[in-house]
Image: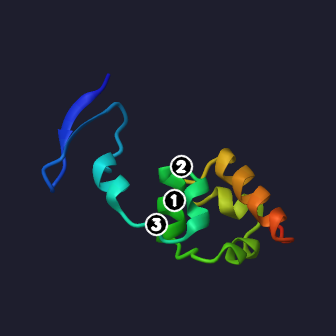
Amino acid sequence: MRSKRRCDKGHTYYKSSACLVCPICENMKPMVSEWHNNFAAPARRALEREGLIQLESLSEFSKEEFLQLHGIGKNAVNIADKLLNEVGLKFR
C-alpha cells in the first residue's frame, strides 16, 4: 500500500516501499556522469556512493562484486556489462 510522505525539503510524495528517498529531490539532482542515465535510481545512487564516476572503473569489479553493492541488481549488472562491451572493456 502506498503511503503519503513529506521530505525534509517539503515535497509531498507517495511510496509503497520502505525507501526514504524523495523522488522529487532525486529528479532534481544533477547527474554525476552521463552514462549513469542508463541505470535506475537505486543503481545510480550506488554508483555515486562508491565514487564510480568513470565507466572504466567498473572493469575493476567482477560481476559478483558489482552485484554485492547495495542498490545494484541483475538488471544493473546487465546494463553495465553492455556499456563496458561498447567501449571494449569487461568486468574483471
Q: Mark 2 or mark 3: which comes first in sequence?
A: 3
Q: Write down the quadrant of residue 33 in the picture.
A: bottom right
Q: How many labels does the image show?
A: 3
**Quick check: can you spot residue 75?**
yes
Question: Which image quarter holds the C terminus?
Answer: bottom right
Q: Which residue is drawn at 83% across and 67% down?
A: 90
**Which type of secondary structure does the marked residue at label 2 adopt?**
loop
At which x and y percent is residue 32?
48, 71
Q: Determine the residue positioned at 66% across, 56% down.
A: 67
Residue 43 spot, x, y in % from top left: 54, 55
Mark 3 lies on a secondary structure that is loop
Q: Which mark is residue 40?
A: 2
- Residues at marks 2 and 3, CA–CA distance in whole angstroms: 12 Å
User: Which amino acid does the dot numbered 2 rest on?
Assistant: Ala
In contact (CB < 8 Å): disc 1 and disc 2: yes
Do the residues bearing badges 3 and 1 touch, measured as CB atoms within 8 Å?
A: yes
Answer with left or right where residue 76 lies relative to residue 4.
Answer: right
Residue found 81% across the figure and 70% down from its top: 87
Residues at discs 2 and 3 in contact (Cβ within 8 Å) = no
Mark 1 element type: helix
Sequence-earlier tag: 3 or 1: 3
Which residue is disc 3 drawn over? 31
Check disc 1 and report the residue beneath it: 44
Nearer to us: label 2 or label 3? 3
Quadrant location, the N terminus: top left
